[in-house]
Image (spheres, helix red, strand yellow):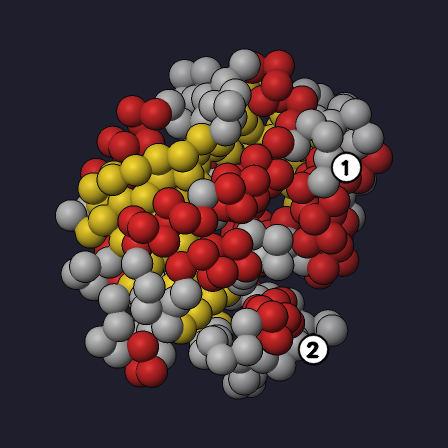
Amino acid sequence: MLLTENAPAPARMIDPAFLNDVLTGLGRSPKATPPIWFYDRRGSELFEEITDLPEYYPTRTETALLAAHGADFAAAVGEGRAVVEFGAGSSRKTPHLLRAIAPAAYVPIDISGDFLHASSAALAAAFPGLPVLPVVGDFNRPLALPGAIEGLPRLGFFPGSTIGNMEPDAAVDLLRAMRRLLGHDAKLLIGMDRIKDQDRLIAAYDDAQGVTAAFNLNLIERINRELDGDMPIADFAHRAIWNDEKARIEMHLEAQKTLHFHVAGQYFQMDAGETIHTESSHKYGTRDERLLLRAGGWEPVKAWTDDEGLFGLVLAEAG
Ligand code: AVJ
């Protein structure tokens, strides 16, 4: 059956990509699932809650950087660009940038049509006269930009340290794809979370209120509901660990005893203490930031950070 891009999937239809990622991921050793599947409606709500937690510094730090350095962005980027945001625009971050640089058009790209159209409508209302041209699609795959921005110089905007979810090789591939998509003369403003004190990092992913735990565990609820699973949610615990070797926070779901369960008719077994690795969030030193960008075809030109050096916002130009 063919579904149009924006039609919600019928309630009982299984998303084949979700099914495939979960069955493959649970069949692998060690078990691992991609973080994209966190974001069903409930997961997106929980992520919003995470961004307000006292321990979760990235969102408020990056937002403050965007609010504080508008004049710098305007000087470095100039007016009249098409801003291409990788991800649906956040109502908190994007307006600061758009206000500062007076772009000629705004193109948010997101895989979730519902979310994208809601956020696009809000931004269009806040910026009357600015053409807002949402593109529903997966920016990890080849896609086309709207014809209306043909000929305009582009500024890519990739906030949130979302790049950190990717292994270095995939991050480089994505940066190169962005470089190709945005064309010559393009610039890129990207948020990258910094390496810092381990306790602070762990607290940001294992908060006192347990919101991040609920976010991680929600994946099990989603699997049970959407993929006909019987995973015993009460027998899993949220774990956030700092992997110093790879400079990343890892989230895991740890089996609290020997477990037996099914997903979509397939049987799985887990030993006590075995985990499902559900997310990696890479952190970068200042040189790492620049090295990663250069490897991806972008030459860093300027970086902004907060007083504590918690988070970096880097401007780069197509190399
Ligand atoms: C949206 C990928 C940037 O890695 O900090 C927050 C997701 N996971 N708490 C991050 C997340 C757990 C977040 N990113």
Q: Earlier in the sequence, mark 2 or mark 1?
A: 2
Mark 2 vs ligand 1: CB under 8 Å? Answer: no
The answer to whether residue 298 is left or right of residue 139 is left
Q: Is residue 76 visible?
A: yes
Q: Kindly report the distance in space between the C-alpha atoms of the residues bearing marks 2 and 1.
A: 29 Å
Query: Tag count in the figure?
Result: 2
Q: Amino acid at mark 2?
A: Pro
Q: Secondary structure at mark 2?
A: loop
The residue sitting at 25% across, 39% down in the picture is 300
Q: Disc 2 vs disc 1: Cβ atoms closer than 8 Å?
A: no
The residue sitting at 73% across, 53% down in the picture is 45
> In which quadrant of the rendered image does the N terminus lie?
bottom right
Q: Position of residue 116 (x, y in %)?
A: 57, 69
Specify the label residue 192 is tagged with. Answer: none
Specify the label residue 10 is tagged with. Answer: 2
The residue sitting at 54% across, 59% down in the picture is 95
The answer to whether residue 31 is left or right of residue 231 is left
Disc 1 marks which residue? 211
The residue sitting at 20% across, 46% down in the picture is 297
Would you place residue 156 above or below residue 238 in this image?
below
The residue lying toward the viewer, choosing from 77 and 145, is: 77
Q: Is residue 137 visible?
A: no
Q: Position of residue 245 (x, y in %)?
A: 41, 16
Q: Amino acid at mark 1?
A: Val
Residue 3 falls in which quadrant of the image? bottom right
